[in-house]
Amino acid sequence: MMSFYHPEVLYSQIRNDLKTLNKFTDDTLIELGVSFNQKYTPEEVRELIPENITLKWYWVDTYSEEDIQSLNKHKYNIVFW
């Protein structure tokens, strides 16, 4: 299950599955979600993604400043689905 993180929300814990990628065989197809630690424009994201990666969609920031402040009030690990 993928988790997504907003760069302006403070988390008690962030899931990192990079170490599990080597458990898959070379012929395995995976869907990968990437969360960044800062804001990027769509153009900047395209420049960060290697050409041999098929990029299907972006989750663009849709949170207001009030949303982010509200999320930062929580003391537990917040996971976006």
Image (cartoon, helix red, strand yellow):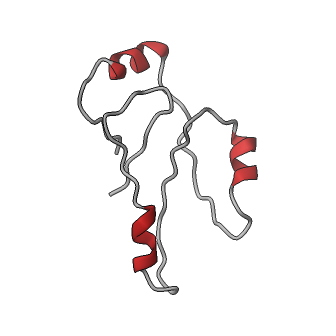
Apparent side of residue 32 relative to residue 15 in the rendered image (left or right): right
Q: Residue at x 42, y 44 (%)?
A: 4
Which residue extends farthest left?
A: 76
Query: Could you say which quadrant of the image residue 5 lies in?
Result: top left
Front one among 17 and 33: 17
Q: Quadrant of the C terminus?
A: top left
Query: Could you say which quadrant of the image residue 67 lies in?
Result: top left
Q: How many marks?
A: 0
In the rendered image, the vertical position of residue 18 relative to residue 35, given as above or below: below
In the rendered image, the vertical position of residue 71 relative to residue 22, given as above or below: above
Residue 33 position within the rendered picture, expressed as x and y whole percent measured from the top left: 48, 54
Q: Residue at x 48, y 14 (%)?
A: 65
Residue 31 position within the rendered picture, expressed as x and y whole percent measured from the top left: 47, 65
Residue 48 position within the rendered picture, expressed as x and y whole percent measured from the top left: 71, 52
Q: Quadrant of the N terminus?
A: bottom left
Q: Residue at x 47, y 24 (%)?
A: 63
In the rendered image, the vertical position of residue 43 relative to residue 51, given as above or below: above
Front one among 48 and 80: 48
Q: Residue at x 68, y 46 (%)?
A: 45
Apparent side of residue 41 relative to residue 13 in the rendered image (left or right): right
Apparent side of residue 45 relative to residue 59 in the rendered image (left or right): right
Query: Could you say which quadrant of the image residue 19 lies in?
Result: bottom left
